[in-house]
Amino acid sequence: MKIRDKKLFEEEKRKYDNKETPSRKTPEKFSTVSSEPIKELYTPKDIEHLEYMKDLGFPGEYPYTRGVQTDMYRGRTWTMRQFAGFGTAEESNQRYKYLLQGGGTGLSVAFDMPTIMGYDSDHPRSLGEVGRCGVAIDSLEDMVVLFDGIPLDKVSTSMTINGPAVILWALYIAVGERQGISSEKLRGTIQNDILKEYHAQKSFIFPPVQSMRIITDIMEFAADHVPKWNTISISGYHIREAGSTAVQELAFTLADGFAYVEAGIAAGMDVDKFAPRLSFFFNSHNDFFEEIAKYRAARRIWARRMKEKYGAKNPRSWLLRFHTQTAGCSLTAQQPENNIIRTAYQALAAVLGGTQSLHTNSMDEVLALPTEKAVTIALRTQQIIANETGVANTIDPLAGSYFVESLTDTMERRAEEYFRKIDDSGGMLAAIDNGFIRREIESSAYRYQRQLEKKEKIVVGVNEYRTNDEPDLEILKVDSELERKQAARVKKLREERDNGAVRKALKELNDAARGNDNIVPRVLNAVKALCTEGEIIGELKKVFGEYREPAI
Amino acid sequence: MAEKIIRVLLAKPGLDGHDRGVRVIAKGLRDAGMEVIYLGLHQTPEDIVEAAIQEDVDVIGLSSLAGAHMTIFPKVIELLKEKNAEDILIVGGGIIPEDDLKSLEDQGVDKLFLPGTTITEIAEFIRSKMDSRAA
Amino acid sequence: MEEWTFSQTGGGVLKGKAMNRQDLADRFRAGDRRAVARIISLIEQGDPLGTSLLAELYDPSKRAIRIGLTGAPGVGKSTLVNSFASILEKQKKKIGVVAIDPSSPFTKGAFLGDRVRMQDIKGTNVFVRSMATRGSTGGLSWPAWLTTAVLEAFGFDTIVIETVGVGQVDVEIRELVDTTCVVLQPEAGDSMQFLKAGLMEIADIYVVNKADKPGTNAMVADLKDFVKLITVRENGWRPPVVLTIANTGKGLDELIRAIDSHKGFLEQTKELDEKRKARIKRQLKQHFYEKMENEIWRAEWSDTLVQAAVNRIISGGDALKEAEELAASLIAGPNPV
């Protein structure tokens, strides 16, 4: 945009810069949800340093600020991927079939806490948690049931699993084999992002160094045998849920990504062999423009670093592809129907930010597992955005906005500051060890809580606009019989299987873990020999040890 | 005589690691002038009760986000009774469905706080309970 | 003897069935952990019942070895205590742990998180108490002193005190324990950082924890040079340097041997008894100070004298003379003969 009368422009702009408005007195109120200060007005001045081809470029072209595909949603709309799974494998299987029939285009598996932490359903620590927050998987038997009647070459499956990711992935490959589908044809994602567990979600099993070794083994095996699989979904979602700011989510997630890239290179792999299979998973919170700027900045930073710092030659290594989930932590137990509105705005931000797939939360998730009705509304929210709002008709419609471009730039700059701090403390593993990342996230979480208490930030229905009578919401209940049944099932399996084969498979796994051989083929053998998840994790703990949470 | 400072034990029972809430509350109660003994993740009811006794706390606060509350809270209460320590105030927070909430309060949980509760409310609740007991 | 119940202590909060003084003493003698915990609380709240019970329950035949662990935050002290105590527990020892962290000077609140790192010592032979400094200037509060005595009287044979090493607390911890371990960790690129810690003069044993981190070798070499040059204790003890990796338990056996050998040294030089006498003396002194503070300085009659002296100094009186005279009057008491 041209400015003919520069003098007049400067004069008018100065009026804004010097204006005494109420907003100057309460800057907190006009900052983003992450406390990023926002100016009252943005003008061409704020983006005059940007160079279009260098900083934005065309969609599907380096540095991908405007998106990773040349035609974006005109070619194909984003994948509407609803995370689901609960109870037994049979029940989850029913839910998946329902979602696929209803127009869902991908599966997303949630596991229960015992599965996530590597305990079998009959372990004392599993008591009361089997099948509660996701599906309980103990062995290949359960996995076969989970995907019964779902041809694995026809769906793409995302599995939210980290510590024991290698086991669940091996189980999926083994189910494919039973269905007669070769591993080359399998499509999907395992989250497998252990670094954010130490920062945020804290479902860690092994110490960081050993966990990174498992991950490089997975990257290597995938490149050779499961080429269409996304080996790590590098996740900012949980970092944000743990209370980080948008900038911290962006910076720590990308820094984790760089740590995986460095680990892969250090393990002797060519960066272009594994980098194209790395994908990302971000949160979408309430602050509309901040979220959009975050996604745009993420693409630009990743592309620049992958090309310039890590020397990737394959453009697919430069692409930051990402899944988005609307912010669970933004949902309120008060007036839960309002969550539909929050989720819709968050979903819109993710779409305007160019997401490849999207999960919209159900309004009742802050109270319990979602009901079918709530899940349907959440899916319909996405369909309304895709089909009715018209936002998907053109690519990156907010590009060129003084505000959005300026904020994108700020996000990038602030992330770079964090990268420097992490480098200064000796890299990501050192920053985990000395608690830097965790402390940064925790102090943001605490600051936000203080802002809510002081009403510097308003959450409708929580610290303003409260009502006394809360509507009763219908809630999904998990049958407590399920735990007993699932525990009995795994006990029976242990009695009936060939335990000689089990012992042999575990021994071979132990040997591989001690040495330098890739452990994935050994895990695959172990799951096919009907070793349980808990047994495999137990064997690996003998070699790798366990990680303990730090105090502060 | 030195003044009485309220001692609160906070723990995160169960297998999930979502400790944002419990850690924010730990800081908040510290800043509200209480001594917070934080136990960390994956605590069993036995661990919690033994620590509460050694630390001679006034309050036990438990956070539950993954659905294990119906197993863990009643067990903590049972163990406290066994050890003659049922007078320790029990509060909890997290994602707890309405029916469970009522059932747990019937079983002896003093108060359950749902998402959206301010730390000020929690601190005030604890203080008012302490005052009414000391009186 | 007066009948006490907890509801009357003002310490507040009524707990359990109201235990009277006798009940509490009986339960303490019978090994009830709740009674120990409660007596510590009474002491912490400044309730005279606490100190009075401690005096009653004191048994000179019960003697514990006292070990202090001090060092900067994050060096792994709690993890060391965890590994250390779990080894001793397996040897059927009874271990009392006092973990001290700072109170906020503004709110008086505290975050006591040491138990997070002590997940292996949940057996019945270990007792852990987290304490806040509660405004004590030194960092080692007086109730913490008395707590070690309570634990000793209860029959713990090993008492471990964990403190954040800052300033005055360093000297105090030497008085409170038999063996002081200063815990350090390697810092890449700064092997001499221990000199800045201000803890170097007090160690009987140096522990370099996280000894698998880069910079370990350089640090240990510098530390050993430092020990050779400077820190030979007046009694002839030369502090050893022990390497540990607390979260795997590596080096813990060596640390335990070093502690034992320091104990042997103290026994041989009769210093163990000297230390004990010094502790009793210190307790008498503290008691004396508190008595002066509470019964003289804070009394109404003394306040009149103090205010008068202040006024005379302000209007040009000889400050030193006034101070001397005031001290003499205060010592003489409210109704001098």
Image (spheres, rainbow, N blue to C red):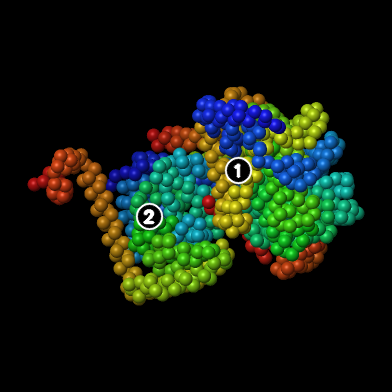
> Residue flagged by tag 1: what amino acid is it?
Ser
Does residue A178 show up? no
Q: Quadrant of residue A343?
A: top right
Q: Chain of mark 1?
A: A
- The x, y position of residue A490, in whole percent, is 76, 54
Q: What SS does tag 2 mark?
A: loop
Q: Real-space Cα distance between discs 1 and 2?
A: 35 Å
Query: Callout 2 environment at 10 Å: few (<14), some (14 to 19), or many (20+)?
Result: many
On residue C279, which mark appears?
Answer: none
> Residue flagged by tag 2: what amino acid is it?
Leu
Q: Closer to us: mark 1 or mark 2?
A: 1
- The x, y position of residue A370, in whole percent, is 72, 35
| Residue, disc 2 | C140
Q: Chain of mark 2?
A: C
Q: Is residue B134 left or right of residue A7?
A: left
| Residue, disc 1 | A244
Q: Residue furthest toward the right?
A: A180
User: Looking at the picture, does residue C7 appear above or below residue C240?
Assistant: above
